[in-house]
Image: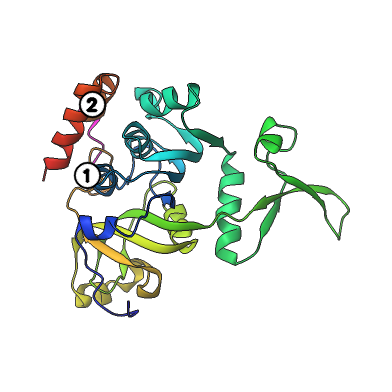
Amino acid sequence: MPVNGNKLMSLSEAASLVEDGATVAIGGAALRRKPVRMVLELARQCRRGLHLWTFVGSLDVDILVGSGCADAVSYSYVGFEHHGLAPRFSRAAREGKIEANEYSEWMFVGGVRAAVMGIPFLPTHAGRGSDLVQDRGLKEITCPYTGETLLAVPASRFDVAIIHAWRADARGNVQNPEFPDHLIELDYLMARAARHVIVTVEKVASAEQIEQESYRTVLFPFEVTAVVEAKRGARPTAVPPVYPCDTELIDEYMNRAESPEQYSAFLQRLSNED
């Protein structure tokens, strides 16, 4: 696809970029900016064997694990903040039905940063003395300058990254509001560590609108594969300051997630909402 070509796609078309068995990074943090509409589309298309990477997962991970789409999840936390743990993810992890790879926050970020920088690893003190070192198979290295012992966190590279943003033009200039919310920078880092990048947006803007507020641009055409217009596409998670988290809908999900019939009906209803 040409760098400056038209990258607008439907949800279905963009989801076809995610192949069975792909390593998929999902943006957003906890109950903010989760690309829920795209996640639901992947579940609808019955994608299988995915390895999910997300810094702080919630509904995204729970839906894809609960729908049988994911075999592995790498994360620093998965849950619904004060609403509780992620029910379907937690059960699958306990029962050994998925590979659950926990990282410390800095381990996770360090691996993504290494990929973006084009280097095989980043050194860190984070995690030393914890079980995560052995669990993740991290190697110790010696600093050539100080002689101190550090951990080498390997680069985390992805087949596809999926993020939700405020707006973009058809070429793939992606923008977010003037006052971005918590941990938003990691969305852009994960995008830059992926071969393909799908961005769902609240609205498609004209090139002129993008140029008038170019200081808001966070990703550029050469970094983006597909742009999908999905109004309220992160709902029920929040897109500050565009709309808040729908806490009532989150509570309803938590109440229905344990029943296969109610879970399926809830996802169908969520998929059909405008």
Using the image, tell me which numbered label, if any, was put on residue 220: none
* Residue drawn at 33 percent across, 66 percent down: 216
Magenta span main SS: loop
Q: Is residue 27 magenta?
A: no
Residue type for callout 1: Tyr
Seen in the picture, residue 240 relative to 168 is either above or below; the reply is above
Seen in the picture, residue 34 relative to 193 is either above or below; the reply is above
Residue 252: % across, % down: 22, 24
Nearer-the-camera pick, 254 or 17:
17
The residues bearing labels 1 and 2 have C-alpha atoms spaced at a distance of: 25 Å
Residue type for callout 2: Tyr
Residue 204: % across, % down: 19, 65
Residue 66: % across, % down: 34, 31
Residue 54 shows in this picture = yes
Pointer 2 local density, CA inside 10 Å: few below 14, some 14–19, many at least 20: many
* Residue drawn at 20 percent across, 34 percent down: 267
Which comes sooner in the sequence, label 1 or label 2?
Answer: 1
Nearer-the-camera pick, 57 or 214:
57
Seen in the picture, residue 40 relative to 82 is either above or below; the reply is below
Find the magenta span and give its range.
243-248
Using the image, tell me which numbered label, if any, was put on residue 243: 1
Image quadrant containing the N terminus: bottom left
Asked whether disc 1 touches disc 2, contact meaning CB atoms under 8 Å apart, the reply is no
Name the side, left or right, on which 43 lies relative to 206: right
Residue 252 shows in this picture = no
- The quarter holding residue 85 reads top left
Pointer 1 local density, CA inside 10 Å: few below 14, some 14–19, many at least 20: some
Q: For the residues carrying marks 1 and 2, which lies nearer the camera in this image?
A: 2
Name the side, left or right, on which 128 lies relative to 149: left
**Residue under numbered circle 2:** 263
- The quarter holding residue 262 reads top left
